[in-house]
Image (cartoon, helix red, strand yellow):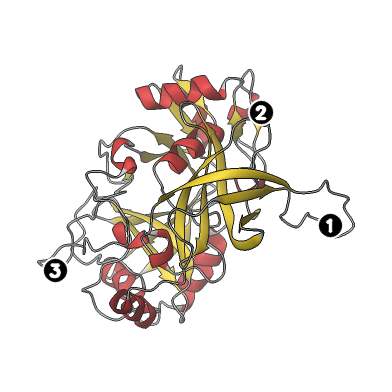
Amino acid sequence: MTRSPLLQRPGAVAAEGPDAGVAWHYGDPTGEQRALVAGTAVVDLSHRGTVVVTGPDRLSWLHSMTTQALTGLSPASGVESLVLSPKGHVEHALHVVDDGAATWVGVEPGTAPALLEWLQRMRFMLRVEVEDVSADWAVLGEPSAATGDGTVWVDPWPGATPIGEGGSADTASYSAVSTLEHPGAARPWREVRVPRAQLAEAVGDRRLAGTWAAEALRVEAWRPRLGRETDHRTIPHEVDWLRSAVHLHKGCYRGQETVARVHNLGRPPRRLVFLHLDGSGHDLPAHGDDVVLAGRKVGHVTTAARHHELGPVALALVKRSVAVDAELFALAGSAPGPSPEEERDAPRPIAAAQEVVVAP
């Protein structure tokens, strides 16, 4: 794990879990959220990884292996793509942008080595070179939709991005709302790459916000994240990833049969929901805590956060059969601890009112 130099800033509190190595907050998480909404803050995401693909076959090669249509990708156009298992389960989420000479792929913290190893095995005789440049390049998150120099990735969420051979990414979605009504439409976001040695200089005197603030706004936008909203059996339909990361009219790729079958049948086994949590207590459920209905487990919390306006909120995966008006509870403290011998308090039920993200 690389520890960010920005953790030396006054008030910085280090994050844990998947965001270890950067700041959770800088002493004022509520103010930091408001600054992000106002467009006046920046988030240290220097723990994210970056893989660079070069060579004349780079886009057609990535196109053939991932869920997005990439052969017609224009320079500086940010798109999202997924690497699926042969059974269609999500393995990697790729933030892809091309500068005309190289394709920059942003990935979740700690996943670049595994992606690099898989890509190296898939090179065959094609004219491509792949390199993990995470040690040389850091990432800053900004509340902006402005494109940059071809290394800046602009988040396409929640709308489909028109790319591909004479066509556009399919706008079909399992979401219960249209793109115009989607809460993510009010969340511009981009990832800017800077030389790691110049990270502090790139931030300058701009206000810093921690991952607490960034994650709260991501939850509000119903935006899925690899390793939080996904597990070993997640398929894209369950978390509404057909919105931004899957092109339904492109050629064959690993896991496509599952994508097509579930899309045609319209029955993903689970669905993502947004939860408004009872804020009368101080508890907040953790990743993996149970979601129950009438005392029976029907899902689990994926990400919980304290939002500056909405209060305690969460994303969760529940069974598709759960009624959209069901009275749910999140059991804080029910997820297994790091050690089986660890003594834990009894789980605390938190009332949770759901908003439908993926329609049943």
Q: Amino acid at mark 1?
A: Ser
Q: Is residue 18 visible?
A: yes
The kind of residue on which mark 3 rests is: Glu
Q: Earlier in the sequence, mark 1 or mark 3?
A: 3
**Label drawn at residue 165:** 3
Nearer the viewer's eye, disc 1 or disc 2?
Answer: 1
Circles 1, 2 touching at the beta carbon (< 8 Å)? no
Query: What's the CA distance linking mark 1 and mark 3?
Result: 51 Å
Mark number, residue 13 = 2
Please rate how many residues cluster around mark 3, counting C-alpha atoms within 10 Å: few if below 14, some from 14 to 19, many from 20: few
Disc 1 marks which residue? 339
Please state which amino acid type lies under the numbered disc 2.
Val
Percent x, y of residue 217 = 44, 36
Residue 246: x and y in percent read 31, 65
234 w.r.t. 177: above or below: below
C-alpha separation, residue under disc 1 versus residue under disc 2: 25 Å
Mark found first going from the N terminus, 3 or 2: 2
Up-down relation of residue 294 to residue 36 (above or below): below
Q: Hey, which quadrant is residue 257 in on the image?
A: bottom left
- Quarter of the image for residue 298 reads bottom right
How far apart are the two marked residues, 3 and 2, measured between alpha carbons? Answer: 47 Å
Residue 302 or 257: which is nearer the viewer?
Answer: 302
Question: In front: 34, or 56?
Answer: 34
